Amino acid sequence: LRLLVREVPLKVELRGMLSGTEVFESPGEETPLLVVLAYAEGLQEVHPLQEQLVDKGDARRLKEVLSERIATCREHCMPECMLEHRQPSKLEDRAIVIPDGPINPEFVWKTLESITWPACTSRANVKPADALFIQAFPMGMVNNYRRG
């Protein structure tokens, strides 16, 4: 984050669940874009807060500044099999219709077989050691770390 704020006009508040808040801010006169992140120390993961909205103009400006670096990172840091692995679309999510009344196991099975399971790299406890990712997603009640 220290390197990022040197290059891009940002103010980043990193809210650790256990360690408190640390602020990283760009030097200079330009008004930085505020980004608030939640850090889950136990998982060693950083997540954006869900309620956070970024102005489209600010988002476009950041993408322009970082476009070359983003392309380089994708090229060098993301395995080819991950680039080819399709994530579920919002259209696909909306196509799942929950029936009125009781839901039977056959409906659940059919639905699970019909969806695209996303690539997941964060589940080291269940991912085989030689795998780059597994296909998984949370079901049921989950703790949403993005909420801070």
Image: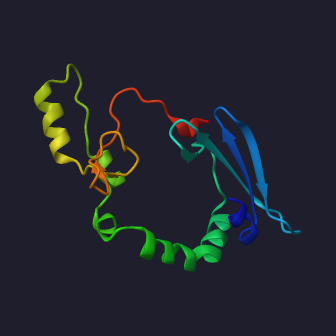
Displayed quadrant of residue 24? bottom right
Residue 78 spot, x, y in % from top left:
40, 67
Q: Quadrant of the C terminus?
A: top right
Left or right: residue 134 versus residue 66 is left
Q: Residue at x 84, y 68 (%)?
A: 30
Residue 40 spot, x, y in % from top left:
57, 38
Q: Nearer the viewer, residue 60 or 16?
A: 16
Residue farthest along the left direction in this orientation: 106
Residue farthest along the right direction in this orientation: 29
Q: Nearer the viewer, residue 139 or 131?
A: 131
Q: Nearer the viewer, residue 78 or 110?
A: 78
50 up-or-down from 54: above or below: above
Q: Residue at x 87, y 69 (%)?
A: 28
Displayed quadrant of residue 139? top left
Left or right: residue 96 versus residue 62 is left
Left or right: residue 138 versus residue 113 is right
